[in-house]
Image (cartoon, rainbow, N blue to C red):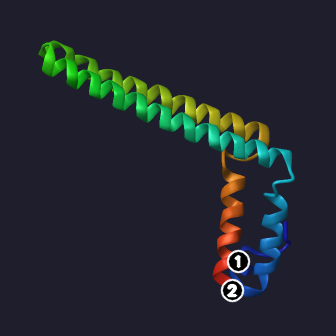
Amino acid sequence: MLGVAVEELDNKEMAPKLIQLSSDRFSRELLRNRISDLCGAIRTVWGWLGSLLQLAVILGVAWYTFTDNLNTVVYAWFIVAISLIFWVTSVAFSLTCRLFTGRYPGEAKQARKSVAEFLNNET
């Protein structure tokens, strides 16, 4: 987009142009970036929900194994199923977000954060 060779991107003189390009491309003003940020938050909550559900299953299995009988330990395999279901849906959700917005979930927010960190380190 800048019309320069890849080798020239490491040049210090290119930094202002790269920052401007990134700021324009990942601006909060663009709807696709807002949707990407929303999808990032949804995917984060989804990941936490999956982790909490897995923790609840392992705690429940451990409790009933110690208090009831050893036959309930087989239900610990539900953790693998839960993990796979949450992983597959997260990947599908991420690819759907990429298809509709051109960005992965949270990509725009991460790019803005990287630009801000770069600018803070330069001063």
The residues tagged by marks 2 and 1 sit, at their Cα atoms, a distance apart of 7 Å
- Element under disc 2: loop
Query: Would you place residue 60 above or below residue 14 in this image?
Result: above
The three-letter amino acid code for the residue at tag 1 is Leu
Q: Quadrant of residue 69?
A: top left
Residue 40 is marked as none
Is residue 34 shown left or right of residue 107? Answer: right
In the picture of the structure, the residue carrying the numbered disc 2 is 123
- Element under disc 1: helix
| Residue at horizontal 55 percent and vertical 34 percent from the top | 46
Q: Quadrant of residue 10?
A: bottom right
Q: Residues within 10 Å of mark 2 (few under 14, many from 20)?
A: few
Query: Would you place residue 14 above or below residue 31 in this image?
Result: below
Query: Would you place residue 93 above or below residue 76 in this image?
Result: below
Quadrant where the N terminus is found in the figure: bottom right
Query: What percent of the width, then of the height, locates residue 43?
Result: 59, 38
Question: Do the numbered discs 2 and 1 sit on residues whose CB atoms are within 8 Å?
Answer: yes
- Give whichever of 69, 77 is nearer the camera: 69
| Residue at horizontal 66 percent and vertical 58 percent from the top | 110
Is residue 95 shown left or right of residue 89? Answer: right
Q: Quadrant of residue 51?
A: top left
| Residue at horizontal 78 percent and vertical 86 percent from the top | 13
Is residue 51 shown left or right of residue 12? Answer: left
Quadrant where the C terminus is found in the figure: bottom right
In the picture of the structure, the residue carrying the numbered disc 1 is 119
Query: What percent of the width, then of the height, locates residue 85?
Result: 48, 25
Query: What percent of the width, then of the height, locates residue 56?
Result: 35, 27
